[in-house]
Amino acid sequence: MHTTAYNIDTLELKKHKDMRNARKRELQKECKARERALTTDLLSQLDHKVPTTRMSTDKHKGQLPSGRNREQLLADAVDHVRALRRSHSAPSNQALAPAASRNDQPSSCTGEILLDAMLTSHRERMVVVELPSWRIRRMSAGFEGEYRESVFGTTMVGQSLMHFVDTDDADRLREYGRR
C-alpha cells in the first residue's frame, strides 16, 4: 500500500513539475516575443533615422526597409555618429553655418535611440553604469539573460558592476573610472 501511495505522489509531483516547466517555457516564449517585437521596432526606427551608406546586393531574410541588414545598419549608425561628432567639434564648420540653420535642424538620430538599440543585443554583453559608484543603470538583453537566474534576482539594475569584475581587474577599472 505504501508503494502505491508513493507512486501516486511521485506521479502527481512529476505532473505538477511538468506543468510548472510548461508554464515557464510559455512565459519565456512570451518574453522572447516581446523582446523581438521591441528589437524590430527599435531597428525600424533606427533604420529610418540613420543615413544609408551601405546597400546589400543580396536579398536576405530579415532585411530592413532601407535594404540594409542589421550589421550594415549598425555600421552606418557608428559612421553617422562619428560624422556628427566631427561636424560638431569642428569650429570652422560652426562658424561658417548660420546660427538659425544650426539650431533648427534636429539630429536625425539621438544617442538614446542608438543606446536602446544596442541594449537589445542578445549576443553582446553591455552595461550602462553610473560613475563613480559603478552601479548598473541599464544592461543589454544578453547580459540580463545570463544573470536572470542569479542570486542577485531578476534584475541587476542597482547592483555594483564590481561584483562581476575579477579582483585583478577591479583596480584598473576603478582607475579608468577616475579619468
Image (tube, helix red, strand yellow):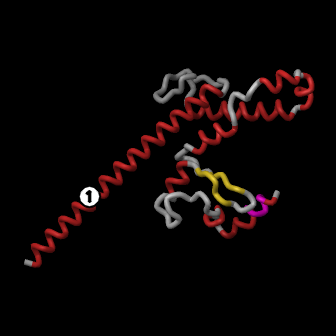
The spot of residue 2 in percent (x, y) is: 11, 78
Task: Please tell me which residue is depicted at 73% across the width and 34% down the height of the picture.
Answer: 81
Q: Which residue is drawn at 50% across and 67% down?
A: 151
Secondary structure, mark 1, is: helix
Query: Start and end of the magenta stretch?
Result: 173-177
Q: Position of residue 66 (x, y in %)?
A: 57, 22
Q: In which quarter of the image is the C terminus?
A: bottom right
Q: Mark 1 points at which residue?
A: 18
**Name of the residue lying farthest toward the bottom:** 2
Residue closest to the far left: 1
The amino acid marked with disc number 1 is Asp
Q: Nearer the viewer, residue 167 or 34?
A: 34
Residue at 55% x, 43% y: name it.
120
Q: So how many labels did they put on this image? A: 1
154 left or right of 28 in image: right
In this rendered view, identify the residue nearer to me: 166 or 139: 139
Instruction: Give the left or right position of residue 62, taking residue 113 as reference.
Output: left
**Image quadrant where residue 13 sits:** bottom left
69 in relation to 158, above or below? above
Q: Quadrant of the N terminus?
A: bottom left
User: Looking at the picture, does residue 12 appear above or below residue 66?
Assistant: below
| Left or right position of 147 against 11 | right
Q: Is the magenta stretch mostly helix, strand or loop?
A: helix
Q: Is residue 49 magenta?
A: no
Q: Can you give x and y, in whole percent of width and height, for residue 136 in the image?
A: 64, 57
Q: Which of 122 and 37 is in front in this view?
A: 37
At 39% across and 44% down in the image, what residue appears?
30
Give coordinates of residue 65: x percent, y percent.
54, 23
Residue 132 falls in image quadrant: bottom right
